[in-house]
Image (cartoon, grey):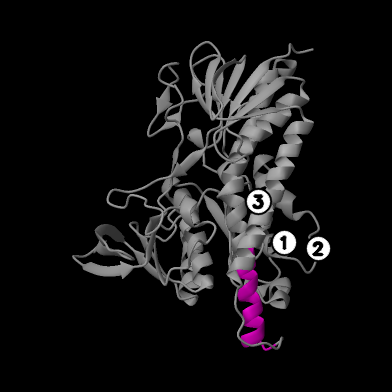
Amino acid sequence: MNKEKHIVIIGSGPGGYHAAVLLSKENHKVTIIEKAGIGGTCLNVGCIPTKALLDHVSLFEHFRESVIKKKIFHGENLSINIERLKAFQSEVIKQLQQGLEKLLMKKQIKLIHGEAKLLAEGKIQVTSKDGNQVIFADEIIIATGSRPKSIPGFEFDGKLIVSSDHIWNIPAVPKNLLVIGSGPIGIEFARIYNLLGSTVTISEIKEKICPILDSEISENLVRSLKRRGINLKPNFATKFIEKKSDSVVVEFLSTEISEKIREEFDQVLISVGRESNTQNLGLAECKVELELPDYIKVDKFLKTNVHNIWAIGDVTKFPQLAHTASYQARTVAANICGNNGNNREFTGSVIPSCIFGYPEIAFVGKTEEELKDSNVSYKTGKYLFLSSGKAKASGLTEGIAKVLMDEKTKKIFGAHIIGAEASNLIHEIVIAMQNELTVEEVINSIHAHPTYSEVLLEALEDCLGEAIHV
C-alpha cells in the first residue's frame, strides 16, 4: 500500500485535472490551484469553444451546398444566427465546466482559485482575492499551459490586433480579417470567419501554407481554402505600418522577390504559435531548470531536476496539444504512485494532430519530406475521398488519405489525411504505430461498408499494391 501523499497541481487544464483524478483514485490527497477558469485554455477559450463554432459553420456550409447547388432542399436566404451560435457555444462551455466541477467534488479533489508561486521544499504560496496562504505538498505538478505569442509591432489590444483568446466567442465579424500565421489555429479561425462572412487573408512567412503538414496535404488545403475565397500570401513577411481608429495598415514583404504590398484590414489575428506559462511561478528561486525558449526541462519520466516537481502539457517541449497533456498526466500519476516499482517513460513519438473544420486534417508520424531527407526506403499508399462510396453518398468528397510505409519492415512511418472525419480516422494509424503493427496486420481486419474508414483501408492496401479501387 502506497503512503498517502499530498499532491498539488498548478493548473486545471486537461493535463492538470486528468492527473488529479488519477492520483485521487490511488487515495492521495490532491489539490488543484487554478488562477483562471476551470478546464484551462482548452475548455474556456480553445479546443471546445472553437469546435462548437467550426462544427456548426461547417454544417451550414454543407447544407447550403445541398440547397443551392444540388437543390436537394428548398430554401432561400440561408444565414447563420450568430447570437444563437454564441449562446450554444456558451452553454457547451458551461455544461462542461459544471461537469468538471462535479467530477472534482466526487473525487474529493480540492480546488483553490488563485495564483501559485513555488517557494521551497514543497511550499507553495497562493495569492487569491481572499488573501495569501502557504500550502505544503509532497509532490508538485506544474500544468500551467500556454498563451498566444505576439510578434514585434503587433502587440495585442484585444480589438484591432487580436489573438485567439480575443475572438473565440465572435465579439464581432470584421469585414476584412488578416490572419498572420497559417498553423492549425490560424487555419481554423480563417475557416470560421470566412463562413461568417469576413473576407479573410492568410499571410505566411514560409513557402508552405501550414508548414507542419506533409506537402501533398498542404497542397490540398490550399486548393480548399482558395475554393472558399480565402486569400493566401505564402512567402510574405508582414510589417506593421499604422493603427487607425477602426483599422490596421500593414505591409507585406515578399521573401522571394523585391515586392511590397500595402493593405488595410479591420482586424488582424496573430496566430504564430504559443508560449509556455512559466513566468512568475518561482521556478528560478526553486532552481527548476528551463530549456529554450521557455520550456520546463524534464527527463523521460517528466520529472524536473528538483526531486518532487514534475511538469506536463504546454510547459514541456512536446507538442502543445490537450491530448499530449492528458497522456502525460497518466505518465506522471503512475510515476508518483510508483506502482510495482516501475517507472513509466514518455517518449512522445506517436502523437496525432488535427485541424478542424471541413475538410478536416489529421496526421501522425513522419511526413514524406522528412523520409526523403533521412534517405530511408519507403512506400506510399494513397486514396481519394472522391472514390469513396460513403463520401459520394454524403456529398463530402474533398481530400485524400496518404500512408507512408517502411519498405523493409512494412511498419507505418506516418499517415496524413485531409477529408471528412479525418480526426477520427487517424486513430487507427495511431494504434498501429504505437503497437508497431505492420500494414498487413492492419488490413487483415474487416472495415464496415460504406464508411470513411475504407478510405484509409484502401490507402493502406495501396502501400502493398493491393488496393481494389486504385
Distance Cα–Cα, label 3 vs label 2: 34 Å
Q: Residue at x 68, y 55 (%)?
A: 91
Mark sitting earlier along the chain (3/2): 3
Q: Residue at (69%, 40%) from the top-left corner?
A: 435
Query: Which residue, given by chain and number where applicable, does mark 1 sit on?
Result: 453
Tags 2 and 1 touching, CB below 8 Å: yes
Determine the secondary structure under disc 3.
Answer: helix
Marker disc for residue 448 = 2
At label 1, the amino acid type is Ser
Residue 54 locus on image (x, y percent) = 59, 63
Return the disc, 2 or 1, that comes first in the chain's sequence: 2
Q: In this view, does 356 lie to the left or right of 373?
A: right
* In the foreground, 359 or 364: 359
Separation (CA) of disc 2 from disc 1: 8 Å
Decide: few, some or many residues near mark 3? Use Cα within 10 Å; few <14, some 14-19, many ≥20: some
Mark number, residue 93: 3
Q: Which of 130 and 207 is in front in this view?
A: 130
Instruction: Answer whether residue 227 is visible to the viewer in this image.
Output: yes
